[in-house]
Image (cartoon, helix red, strand yellow):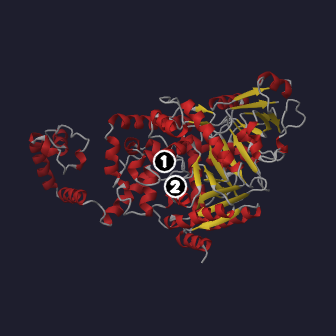
Amino acid sequence: MGHPELAEKFIANDERMHWHDKALWFVRAKRDNASKSVDEWEKLRKVASQIKAHTLDKLDYYLEEFEKNATAKGLHVHWAKDAKEHNEIVLRLLLNNGAKKLVKSKSMLTEECHLNPYLEEHGIEVVDTDLGERIVQLRKEPPSHIVLPAIHLKKEDVGTTFEEFLGTKKGNSDPTYLTRAARAHLREKFLGADAAMTGVNFGIAETGGVVVCTNEGNADLGASLPKLHIASMGIEKIIPRLKDLAVFTRLLARSATGQPITSYTSHFHAPIIDGQMHIIIVDNGRSAIIGSKDFKSSLQCIRCGACINTCPIYRRSGGYSYGYTIPGPIGSTLGASKDLRANKTLPFACSLCASCSNVCPVQINLHQQLYKHRQSVVAQKLLGFQKHTILKIATWVMKYPLLMDISGKLARAIVPKLPRSIVYSKVNLWGKKRELPPFPKNSFKELYKQRKGK
Amino acid sequence: MSSKKTILNSIKANKSQNPIELPETNIPHMHYEDKNEKFATMLASVGGNAIWLEDGDINAFVKEHYKDVTVITSTIENLTCKTKEANLAQTPHELEDVELAIIEGEFGVAENGAVWVKNPKNKYRALYFLAKQLLIVVKKDAIVDTMHEAYERVRFDKDGYGLFISGPSKTADIEQSLVIGAHGPTAACVLFV
């Protein structure tokens, strides 16, 4: 199913759709306040974008630097060309250390690799420890947002989920009560874990360490208790210097949730005492995108989610309507770059309003990329027959001014007289959930001529 | 061919032949007239609090403000209020019962209420997250304006672990309602002495 079909399910509940829209807009508004509190915000965005662009231009060099420096500090570095290899490395590390119980903090990369089901098939207990991720894991759902995994759920939904799995009181959906219940439940999991996995926000080539940014403290709690810590990192997470973090830590949390910084910004350059720390560098289709002039900058993304929160389509269609690991504008361009056929509807889940590009802390031209992807969809004949035919006809009509004038006249005369069943028939894809405005008497061209004469 | 080679070759084949320059990070940035006030405001906004201790008597402060707390660890030497020696634990798991961890912070950051903590004397980093409450002790005048100055003071020439802590742990994963105290400490106070 494509985005329109999946979105249809979401918007069927009108009240919830508007609630979701508002919840995300609230986050967007907080982001605006936070960004406006920094005088040099625009300069920061520019510098961040340049650092990332530079790094991508010399990524092979920086990855090798990272490996060299990390190894010198006693960390183990692994390379995985795809999801399968990544998952196999994780499983091997766990089995070699006799680890059966794994606590995980947020990592969209492991979602992308479908790590959890793979490990569970091999007898590993995997517990997602971010509160939002734990909620969706218990519900057997994927995250619907990269920063706010359970944003699609109401507190009552969480209440009933915890009632079933954690034995919380029936009907109690107080967020503080539920958070405390999760804290107690997950504390047990942390203390009993054999290994921990985290994602990586930034890998520093210069020092060979990784930085993880969280609010809940779950990544740190996991990584500081069991003896084995595995961090999965996409190749694009590398930054050249330690001091580059000044730029990124100022942008990340403000863009994500409007906070001045995350509660914890942890710099890992060593395992815990008698422990091991492993970093898996994963490509999984990323290096190919570097070769694309139009889409390369999508790899600059620092996964703040600002583009998702501001997107009018995401806010009204929800994360699941995208059918891709990462929803919203950034997911639509990454997904289309990775597999255009499978994600052919995503570039159209966009109103080209450009709000995403304007809030992006690393200045990715998201809306332009989606526009480019649309052209590829058409060029590769992946556009649906109905849409394709309508656009073909429209192109033909617009090519001939006389034909356009006549068609306009006819439409203005006939359409208002037609019954709804015809105007809003299945052919009118645009008319789903939309109302045509009242037709004017005259075309713009006619009005313009009249006025010009005066 | 190894996966490392495959990935690096793919990058080499795809990357631009004209790399752009790496920009300078230390751009002109904000300065605050009253760094202390800014720091305190920002820390309060993220659920923490900052206190300036005139007499520098940490023991007395703890006695007064943490009356019902019995299990106290400290990375600062010679604190009489300490009741548990964190470094003597056999495993970090033994620190689960810590109610108050008094730790040293190197400096604060005014723009976001964060404190840089890199404590080579502390054996278990789990202490920062297992403890119910955190008391971070920082030297009185050690506050910088922004993260630009902060990272000038941060070094990882050798191995190690360090972090910025900004307030207590928190979450807003249930309907965007902010709850202070997620998996880590439920309270965090920065004490300037």
**Marker count (numbered):** 2
Front residue of B155/B172: it is: B172
Residue A143, numbered circle: 1
- In the picture of the structure, the residue carrying the numbered disc 2 is A111
In whole angstroms, how far apart are the C-alphas of marks 2 and 1? 9 Å
**Marks 1 and 2: in contact by CB < 8 Å?**
yes
Instruction: Name the one closer to the observer, A430 or B136.
Output: B136
The label on residue B78 is none
Residue placed furthest toward the bottom = B1
Q: Amino acid at mark 1?
A: Pro
Label 2 SS: helix
Q: Is residue B138 left or right of residue A94?
A: right
Q: Quadrant of the N terminus of chain A?
A: bottom left
Name the amino acid type tagged 2: Glu
B178 in relation to A301, above or below? above
Mark sitting earlier along the chain (2/1): 2
Corner quadrant of residue A275:
bottom right
Q: Quadrant of the C terminus of chain A?
A: top left
Residue drawn at the location 85% of the way across and 29% of the way down: B81
Query: Is residue B25 at all visible to an observer of this figure?
Result: no
Q: What x and y, as percent, mark residue A441?
A: 13, 39
Chain identifier of the residue bearing label 1 in the image: A
